Image (spheres, rainbow, N blue to C red):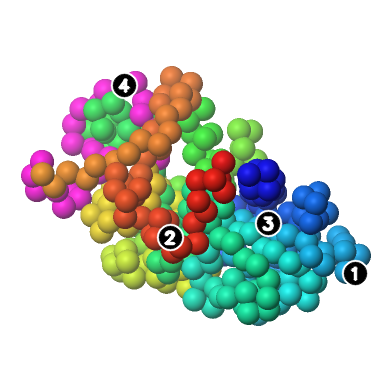
Amino acid sequence: MHQQHTLASAMRRALQLAGNGPAEGVNPRVGCVILSPAGEVLAEGWHRGAGTCHAEVDALAQLDADAARGATAVVTLEPCNHTGRTGPCALALIEAGVGNVVYAVADPGPHSSGGAARLRAAGIDVAGGLLADEVEAFLADWLISARLGRPFVTVKWASSLDGRAAAADGSSRWITGPAARQDVHERRARADAILVGTGTALADDPSLTARAADGALLPHQPRPVVVGCRPVPADAAVRRHPLTPWFIPGHDVAALLRELHERGIRRVFVEGGPTVASAFVRAGLVDEYLIYLAPTLLGGDKLALGDIGVAGIDGQLRLRISELQYLGEDILLVARPAGADETSPIDQTDQTTRATPAETS
């Protein structure tokens, strides 16, 4: 039990280290802690982004030769078995002479998985599933991208309490207050791409940047993506974005997501408008909803969502509210599809690798 408590503490520290890595990009955020046979911390590491050392290698690099022999590597994600910009972490651990590897979540990547099997074949004791639920929640966007071959999709809208995204004349600035609007910008900055339809691009002329409260650009900017067949003027604000916009024709959102995934996009922030948002909802391709509610009433027909394929009450799309925040006078609801807990690919791991209750205590 004492050993399992030590391993659980090390895994939580590895998860904390993983949070130092970049939230955007195609690579997962991974942390690693290397323990001596006596349970003392020998080294720590995390992945700092594409092209840099993976967490295990980052930790091993802090040790002298032979210092890791017989040690235990505690890592949030199964060590990779893939040679890309860097070599396979499983091989690095084998060459370092570690005796045990404990990981939380199995790597679902078709090219990077198999590290646990390689480690076992080399005579290393391997256990998976320790604190898997906590780590899977942390890696939710990357896991969906890796398992489904598409980005994690966040759909955002701001509306009045009666569900209107604009007044009867089409004006919508501003339904919500400054605190809510700033929260949107900070969440934009965590995404790889921000997506609107040509209708929104033409009607609102958005810049699609992520900005600080003083108007300055935030360090990370999402790639602007405009979807639809209508041309966007040469002087449109989106064309002055720090990143070159991608203009993608067509209305097949599943095909669009596959293309974005192939272009290296892991997380998409769908900003509008109602036509595009409704298309993603109707296709069942929304992983997270950000709904900003202002304490106001507008009436009229400018709804935040249009047809989402619900013909009767039995077909309603139930959501599970995972977070509620007050932002000034406004409310942010963060929600996910109600069935995500039971059917999401996040939970489709090999149950044989999960830790027992004693291991996670």
Q: Nearer the viewer, mark 1 or mark 2?
A: 2
| Mark linked to residue 65 | 1
**Residues in magenta?**
290-313
Q: Nearer the viewer, mark 2 or mark 4?
A: 2
Amino acid under label 2? Gln
Q: Sequence order check: which comes first, mark 4 or mark 1? A: 1
Amino acid under label 3? Val
From the image, tell me which residue sits under label 2: 351
Q: Sequence order check: which comes first, mark 3 or mark 4? A: 3
Amino acid under label 1? Ala
| Marks 2/4: CA–CA distance | 47 Å
Residue ID at (82%, 67%):
69
Residue ID at (48%, 73%):
262
Q: Sequence order check: which comes first, mark 2 or mark 4? A: 4
From the image, tell me which residue sits under label 4: 296
Q: Quadrant of residue 247?
A: bottom left
